[in-house]
Image (cartoon, rainbow, N blue to C red):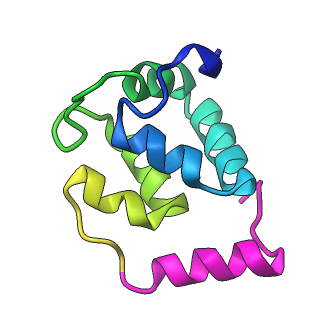
Amino acid sequence: MAQNLAVGKNPLWTAYQDAGSLVRDEIILELKRQGLFRYWLVTASKEGYDLKKKVKAPMRDIFIRLMPETATLFGLPVPRGAAGKKKAAVNDGTLSLFS
């Protein structure tokens, strides 16, 4: 289904594509748990979509928790130290897909 999207039309989609496979898998799992997967596919494919005003808060929160560097796309500051912790977890294998 995601293959039908025009890659790069939305900065959030580009950031997602640039993330590691474990992080992408965890994002998909969280989106499906929250019932937001379809919404994510539609949102990511819209060029010029206003992520700061229109995106649903639960989806925004998933991305900020799992990819802190995306906070600026939503008009929020990057949480201090969050990016370093996530990178370390990916590198040392302690990133949990089921947290």
Q: Is residue 2 above or below residue 82?
A: above
Q: Is residue 28 above or below residue 85?
A: above
Residue name at image x 61 percent, y 21 percent: 2
**Image side of residue 49 versus residue 80, left or right:** left
- Identify the image quadrant of residue 78: bottom left
Residue 29 in the image, given as x and y percentages of width and height = 69, 40
Q: Is residue 69 above or below residue 28?
A: below
- Identify the image quadrant of residue 11: top left
Q: Nearer the viewer, residue 31 or 24?
A: 24
* Identity of the residue furthest to the left in this view: 53
- Identify the image quadrant of residue 57: top left
Q: Which residues are magenta?
A: 80-99
Quadrant of the snapshot with the C terminus: bottom right
Q: How many numbered circles does the render carry?
A: 0
**Residue 39 magenta-drawn?**
no
Residue name at image x 47 percent, y 78 percent: 82
Residue name at image x 37 percent, y 84 percent: 80
Residue name at image x 65 percent, y 47 percent: 24
**Image side of residue 17 versus residue 98, left or right:** left
Quadrant of the snapshot with the N terminus: top right
Residue 62 in the image, given as x and y percentages of width and height = 49, 50
Residue 9 in the image, given as x and y percentages of width and height = 36, 29
Residue 86 in the image, given as x and y percentages of width and height = 60, 74
